[in-house]
Amino acid sequence: MQKKTIVAAVIASVLAGSLAAPVIAQSDNDRGAQMQDRRDGERRGHAGRERGGDRMAEFFELYDADGDGSITQDEIDSVRADRLAEFDADGDGQLTLEEYQALWLDAMRERMVDQFQRHDDDGDAVVTVEEFGEEFADIVARRDRNGDGVLNADDARNQRQRPAQEAPEAPEAETETE
């Protein structure tokens, strides 16, 4: 009996973790976009939409099932179970990799569209090489902590220690005197 309880608990934990993954991924992606927004200032994406948005409002919209302005664990559990059932094509109460992939892609579609719009500066529904490369245009200059003109392990170690500095002038080449 105890073995069945342990197995059931492990399965429930794995399932809960896998159901949380798309929300966690969305949150991580949003944090990255918000950090980029802070670096870039108030940039806007396609059609002038502000990126980021109010994540807490979206959370309430999704999980406040009864609309009372508060979210209970039961509401979260119910929404998550309904979401799993929506993608459980064979109705067995669990998701295969293919079923989970459909759930994941559905959950990530909005983020993908947001990222596309973020790159599409002129709103013409096409991302050019220039638009796609803007964020990386001066990444070496921004991240080169030791001023050697390249990114390497030293820069990664020093990233948390100090901000990028202007690159020091290259030492003059020694000339032989005859």
Image: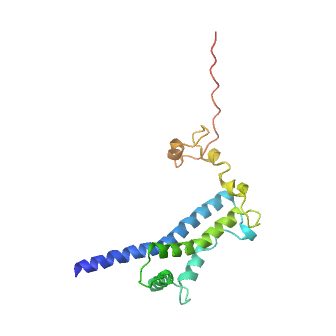
Residue 96, quarter of the rendered image:
bottom left
87 with respect to 120 (left or right): left
> Quick one: quadrant of the N terminus?
bottom left
Residue 61 against residue 123 in the figure, above or below: below
Q: Position of residue 175 (x, y in %)?
A: 64, 18
Residue at 63% across, 35% down: 168
In this view of the protein, can residue 72 be seen by the observer?
no
Residue at 57% across, 65% down: 29
Residue at 67% across, 65% down: 116
Residue 69 against residue 46 in the figure, above or below: below
Q: Residue furthest left?
A: 1
Q: Position of residue 35 (x, y in %)?
A: 60, 61
How many marks can you see?
0
Q: Residue furthest top?
A: 178
Residue 4 against residue 21 in the figure, above or below: below
> Quick one: quadrant of the C terminus?
top right
Residue 95, quarter of the rendered image:
bottom left
In this view of the protein, can residue 97 be seen by the observer?
yes
101 with respect to 110 (left or right): left
Residue at 63% across, 59% down: 36
48 with respect to 104 (left or right): right
Q: Nearer the viewer, residue 97 or 174?
A: 97
Q: Position of residue 126 (x, y in %)?
A: 73, 64
Residue 111, quarter of the rendered image:
bottom right
Q: Nearer the viewer, residue 80 or 38?
A: 80
